[in-house]
Image (cartoon, rainbow, N blue to C red):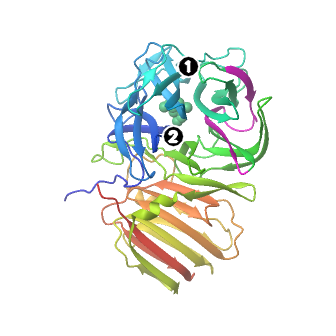
Amino acid sequence: MILKSKRPLFHLTPKENWMNDPNGFSYFKGEYHLFYQYYPYNPYWGDMHWGHAKSKDLMSWEHLPIALRPDMEFDQDGCFSGSAVEDDGKLHIFYTAIRYSKSSISQSGNKIPADEKSLISTQAYAFTEDGIHFKKKKEPIIACPKEVGDEAYFRDPKVWKKDQYWYMVVGSKSLDKEQGNILVYKSSNLVDWQYLSSITKGDIGRMWECPDLFELEGKDIFLFSPIDGGEDEQKNIACYYTGSFNYEKGDFKFEDFDMLDYGFEYYAPQSMLDSKNRRILVGWLVMEEPLDANENWTGMMTLPRVLSLRNGRLQFDVVDEIKSYRRESLQKKDVVVNKQYELNFQHENTFEMNLEVEIKDNFELQLFSDEKKGLKLSYNSKNRQVVINREDVMNDSKAMVFGKERKSPQLLVNNNLKLRIFADKSVVEVFINDGQYVMSAIVNPREEQKKIIVKGNSPLKNIEIWRLEKIF
Ligand code: FRU
């Protein structure tokens, strides 16, 4: 049997080998650029490089040569995460330069730090004029301010502009406590940076990785990925606070907290503002290793999500560009479900589906199903939570390490549930009630798991489904 690849068509994956965090997400000379943490020699984490892809529509990505390699004395063990901004015809890159004070060798034979305290971190700079060749500054631009920070926990610079100044937030941890924080910097020329403040809330995680701070519809949004911020198998989570940032003092008034995704592997997201004034967020979906022995890649990015505010909370929507990849479709209204209903539609596990359900008592949707077993999305009118269970689509893959089941927060809906689902070979993203919450999951379906089945007694008010296609 020829095994078809489980590589998604619309989710950016590395051409081969290892990918983690999105980096330098930006718009430069008419194209979107997305860099990422990359290990080019095997599909496991090792000395970090910056992989690079570009796109005109955020959907079809072209792989470009590696942008940054650990080739300087100060970044000899890795070019960790960071960001990029366009200014004066150049794309300016900020990244964390890493050296190990003590190293060891991982099971896959890669050099890794002996422990998390063995990182020596500084913030470094590079730029490009053509979007392909990158020139590094010969020495780091920011050393860790030892009075407030620990150089083992000082990484992931995110830069943005406000009025005539540039600002940078760097992920960090309190010197004296197991508590995450961020350090804020200010600059007028992108090279000389002045330390402004440190911000913490003290209640979640012991280090804050990959911070991001931006304005959205009159509020300031602070995104971060706290290590050990989670309560179950997934220790590292990605979340946000709304609030207001004081640009003079550099302090943040925290308001409401929420998660960015209620599924399994979402981590280290990064945002950018595009020329259409959309705040677009891309996150990493963590995989520990390739899905199976036939695949030579590890890790992927989510679909780009446009952010807006609804009732003071973030709301998420996939960029409209995906609509131009819609092919055959099927639409049905007012479908009565009597125990089981199978949607007859060819889609090869890459589709978009909109579903509106009138909840009676029970509703279960099985995707990637072979009739009996699939990815289960269920909802009942008592708990009012969407539950996603992937137990039957993991098929012994060790790539997924964050458990089998997740639940959304309680929904306020009155027996009406709306789901917008993007399935893409080995990943699904579920947008609940117009993007109030999103749940993402990596899956590993077998060849024959590709049916869509509805169970229970809840009528389907509306179903719309499109096969999505990309021609290479
Ligand atoms: C988050 C992270 C970052 C770091 C990078 C290293 O996943 O740990 O803090 O820069 O990955 O690959």
* Horizontal arrangement in the rendering, residue 256 relative to residue 87 (left or right): right
Give me the residue at 76% from left, 36% from top. 201
Q: Which residues are magenta?
A: 194-217
Q: Position of residue 454 (x, y in %)?
A: 48, 76
Does 203 appear in magenta? yes
In the rendered image of this protein, does residue 248 appear above or below residue 317?
Answer: above
Q: Position of residue 47 (x, y in %)?
A: 41, 25
Report the magenta stretch's main SS.
strand
Looking at the picture, tell me which residue is in the foreground, 102 or 81. Answer: 81
| Badge 1: residue crowd in 10 Å (few <14, some 14–19, many ≥20) | many
Give me the residue at 63% from left, 81% from top. 360
Name the quadrant of the C terminus.
bottom left
Q: Quadrant of residue 143?
A: top right
Q: Position of residue 1 (x, y in %)?
A: 19, 59
Q: Position of residue 260 (x, y in %)?
A: 62, 50
Residue of label 2: 25
Disc on res. 354: none
Amino acid type indicated by mark 1: Ser
Amino acid type indicated by mark 2: Phe
| Badge 2: residue crowd in 10 Å (few <14, some 14–19, many ≥20) | many
Q: Quadrant of residue 244?
A: top right
At mark 1, the secondary structure is: strand
Residue of label 1: 121
Looking at the picture, tell me which residue is in the foreground, 461 or 187. Answer: 187
Give me the residue at 44% from left, 61% from top. 423
